Amino acid sequence: MAEGLRFELLGPLRALRGGDEVPLGPPRQQAVLAVLLLQEGRPMSYDALVSAVWGGEPPSHARNLAQKYVSGLRRAFAAAGGGGSSPELVWTGSGYRIENAGIDDLAERRTLLREALSARESGDLRRAGALARQAEELWRGEFAEGLAGPYLDGERRRWAEKRLMVLETRLEGDLELGRYRECVHELARQVARHPLRERLVGLSMLALYRCGRPAEALAAYEEARRRLMDERGAEPGPALRELHARIVRQDPSLLPESALAS
């Protein structure tokens, strides 16, 4: 919403008006706000809100605390100004609901990724990659970083997975465009950060192979295999094993068309 508060959750929660950050109170109060924002306009009962913020064993006065934090958020919204475009935290009879508010960076991310998918489906990999990078740049840290509670912990894990999937798809597109030399170092960093992520390992192996470094690609597989055995007691999945076998036999289809023509 152009004239209202801008809310962001791709990193620490923040509210902005005209580029200025609006104070939102203590962390637990911010957690209440984040949980309510994630309902996207749906009402949330007291019990559900308490469970989301405090878990299965809330303090005996959690209900009073929830009321206190709701009041604090209402004061914060009022202090931010903005008239009719300001968020409103209302009681519907069945629960609390936030009106005139959305999670703006999430909405922008969705739009960018929708456009990236459309570009990819139409064969415009360069535009798809550029849009995916713009979506990645919206992240300022972990989802709802620093805010505690079982609901937000679950959302944080879910969004970390979504973030990785987008990154992998973007890197896969870069490899399809022949940017394997540029991808090698980024993939090495990502594998170091997510050593059990088989799709990242496979992309790293492919980038190394296309850079003329097949021995390093095979070594990357053996290292990943050892990690998987140590951590999970399991061999790599079929996709990674197949890629390894294709590299061993130097499958010509692994190389880009330009290399095959030279």
Image: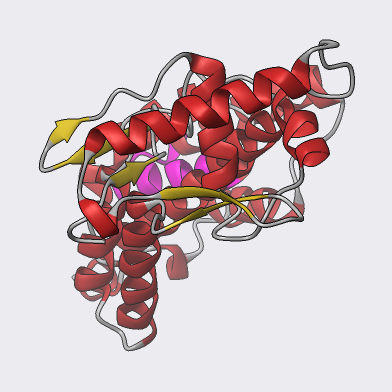
Q: Residue at x 62, y 42 (%)?
A: 198
Horizontal and vertical percent for residue 88?
43, 50
Identified at 44% across, 41% down, the residue is: 204
Instruction: Give me the residue at 76% from left, 46% from top.
Output: 45
Look at the image and tell me whether residue 212 can be seen.
Answer: no
- Percent from the top left, x then y, of residue 215? 45, 34
Quadrant where the image shows the C terminus: bottom left
Along the line of sight, the residue nearer the viewer: 118 or 4: 4
Pinpoint residue 182: horizontal percent, then vertical percent.
21, 44
What residue sits 30% from the left and 80% below the top?
A: 119
Q: Is residue 244 left or right of residue 255?
A: right
Q: Is residue 201 magenta?
A: yes
Residue sitting nearer the eye, 40 or 86: 86
Q: Is residue 182 visible?
A: yes
Q: Is residue 67 left or right of residue 19?
A: right
| Mark count | 0
The quadrant of the picture occupied by the N terminus is bottom left
Q: Is residue 86 above or below residue 12?
A: below
Scheme by which the image is coloured:
secondary structure
Q: Position of residue 149 (x, y in %)?
A: 68, 23
Of residues 116 and 125, the one nearer the viewer is 116
Residue 123, above or below 106? below
Magenta stretch: give its range.
199-215
Q: Nearer the viewer, residue 143 or 232?
A: 143
On screen, residue 123 versus residue 12, left or right, reads: left
Q: Find residue 131 and report its image quarter.
A: bottom left
What predominant SS class does the magenta segment belong to? helix
Does the magenta segment cover residue 179? no
